[in-house]
Each structure stands twice: as C-alpha cells, then as structure tokens.
Image (cartoon, rainbow, N blue to C red):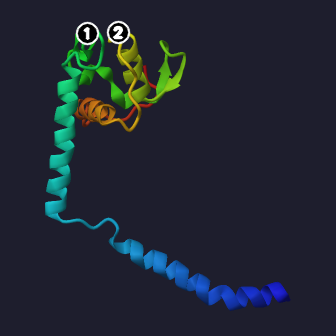
Amino acid sequence: MVKARHIIKTMPVIIAAILFVCLSNGNADEFTKADLEKWTKEFMTVVKEGEKLFHSNKLGNNTVSCDMCHPNGANTHPETYPKFQKQIGKVVALRDMINWCIQNPLEGETLKADDPRMIALEAYIMWERRGKPLAPGKH
C-alpha cells in the first residue's frame, strides 16, 4: 500500500521527465545548410591530412610509407572491419590494423585511437572506399 501511494505521488514527476526528454530531443538532429557545409569542410580537411600521412614516410622510422603496400587507401578494404586479422591473431578494428602496419613495416610507434593522425588516417581510408557496402568480417 505504501509503495502504491509513493508511485502515485511520483507519477507526475516521472511523466514530466519523460515529456521533457521527448520534447527536448525534437531539435537534436536539426541543422542548417551552413552547418553541413562547415562540417563537410572540416571533415575534408582531416581527410586531406590523412592522405598526406598515408603517402609520406612520417609515421615510421624508416623510409616506408603506407602507399608502398597500399597504392591508395581504397585497397585496405576498411568496410570489412572489424574482422579476424591473421597477423594479429584475433578480431580487430581498422585502427588496430593501421597500428600493426605502423609498428611492423613502418617500424614506428603506435597511435592512440584519439590521436589526430589516427583519425586522419581512418578518415582518408574510409573516404577512399565511400559508397561500398559494409561487410564486417569479410575476407
């Protein structure tokens, strides 16, 4: 009986909270054409930085660059990740394979997931494969 009274007393607060959340999220996905243009410009800046890194030898301690094994980002097949990667011996994300390549052929230091260089490399590689259907786990 006490629980029922407590529920009845708190019901208006619960309903108000639900309405607030539902109504306030109505604007969450709205954006202007100017927003979209700004975001696209910022994204493409990151893609271009990734392209520069991919085609340079700045990620390693030797003269090897990503494009020596992968002429462009398209043949890295990012749409197939996560997948089992033989070199690593387990299912990994694209960034894990990027780090494997940096550490092994390039003889460099791995990058953290939030390193701007990692984000740029992922952006460039994904951009090169835009439009391809996702196929996680495919070999």
The image shows residue 89, relative to residue 49, as above or below, that is above
Element under disc 2 = loop
Quarter of the picture holding the C terminus = top left
Instruction: From the viewer's side, name the closer residue of 30 and 100.
Output: 100
Amino acid carrying label 2: it is Pro
The tag on residue 56 is none
**How far across and down, in percent of the image, does residue 45 sit?**
16, 40
Q: CA distance from mark 1 to mark 2?
A: 7 Å
The image shows residue 108, relative to residue 113, as above or below, that is above
- Based on the displayed image, in which of its 4 quarters is residue 111 positioned? top left
Instruction: From the viewer's side, name the closer residue of 131 and 12.
Output: 12
**How far across and down, in percent of the image, does residue 51 sit?**
19, 28
- Based on the displayed image, in which of its 4 quarters is residue 127 positioned? top left
- Residue with the mark numbered 2: 105
Position of residue 2 in the picture relative to residue 100 (left or right): right
- Residue with the mark numbered 1: 64
Few, some or many residues within 10 Å of mark 1 (<14, 14–19, 20+): some
Few, some or many residues within 10 Å of mark 2 (<14, 14–19, 20+): some
For the residues bearing labels 1 and 2, Cβ distance under 8 angstroms:
yes
Instruction: From the viewer's side, name the closer residue of 49 and 81.
Output: 49
Quarter of the picture holding the N terminus = bottom right
Position of residue 51 in the picture relative to residue 17 (left or right): left
Q: Residue furthest right?
A: 1
Write the residue at 30% across / 37% down. Answer: 116
Amino acid carrying label 1: it is Val
Position of residue 1 in the picture relative to residue 104 (left or right): right
Write the residue at 54% across / 85% down. Answer: 16
Position of residue 17 in the picture relative to residue 11 (left or right): left
Instruction: From the viewer's side, name the closer residue of 127 and 104.
Output: 104
